[in-house]
Image (cartoon, rainbow, N blue to C red):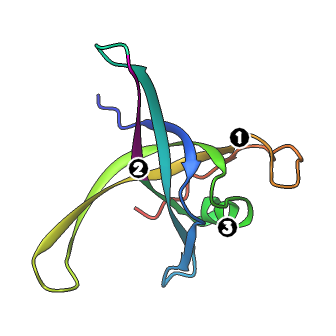
Amino acid sequence: MSVNKVIVIGNLGANPDIRALPSGENVANFSLATTERFTDRNGAKQERTDWHRIVAFGRLADTCERFLSKGRQVYIEGRLTSRQYEAKDGSGRRYRTEIVARQLRLLGNRPNGTAAPKAEASDDIPF
């Protein structure tokens, strides 16, 4: 048995980038910041922010396009994946680790002050 499950709650660093795949299905890419606050050995308060790359496909990508914007707080559940690609400048292979979203929950209030809509989930991931 094996498990590949990631859960993150954080804020979008920028508006999602939405593109159409050759199949006509949409894909959304965005970055999500999670911040950890702690007290170090000397008693000083510290803060550390990690950035995560998120990818969503199909209906979930459409939901991202409609409801997500920079600064929005979201809950993302998905799986961790790594891929390799050739650098555009020809300098060799690059590696990227991403979270492929399976579920998205909008947290907090929308910019106009209304509550967030219900969660969206997707099982139609193309790979």
Q: Amino acid at mark 1?
A: Leu
Residue 68 in the magenta stretch? The answer is no
Above or below 90: residue 106: above
Which label was assigned to residue 69?
none
Helix, strand or loop at mark 1: loop
**Residue for badge 3:** 65
In the rendered structure, which disc, 1 or 3, sits on the residue that comes first in sequence? 3
Q: Amino acid at mark 3?
A: Glu
Question: What secondary structure is found at the residue carrying circle 3?
Answer: helix
Q: Nearer the viewer, mark 2 or mark 3?
A: 2
Q: Around disc 2, counting alpha carbons within 10 Å, would you say few (fewer than 14), some (14 to 19), or many (20 or more)?
A: some
- Quarter holding the C terminus is bottom left
Which span of residues is magenta-colored? 44-52
The residue that label 1 is drawn on is 107
Where does the N terminus fall, quadrant-wise? top left
Q: Quadrant of residue 19?
A: bottom right
Of labels 2 and 3, earlier in sequence is 2
* Residue 63 shown left or right of residue 42 in the figure: right
Q: Nearer the viewer, mark 1 or mark 2?
A: 2
- Image coordinates of residue 99 in percent, x first then y, are 41, 50
Q: Position of residue 68 (x, y in %)?
A: 67, 59
Q: Quadrant of residue 42?
A: top left
How packed mark 1 is, by other alpha carbons closer than 10 Å (few <14, some 14-19, many 20 or more), is some
The span from disc 1 to disc 2 (Cα, nearest Å) is 18 Å
> In this rendering, would 11 be left or right of 126?
right
Q: CA distance from mark 2 to mark 3?
A: 20 Å
**Residue 39 at what x, y percent from top left?**
39, 18
Specify the label residue 51 is tagged with: 2
| Amino acid type at image mark 2 | Trp
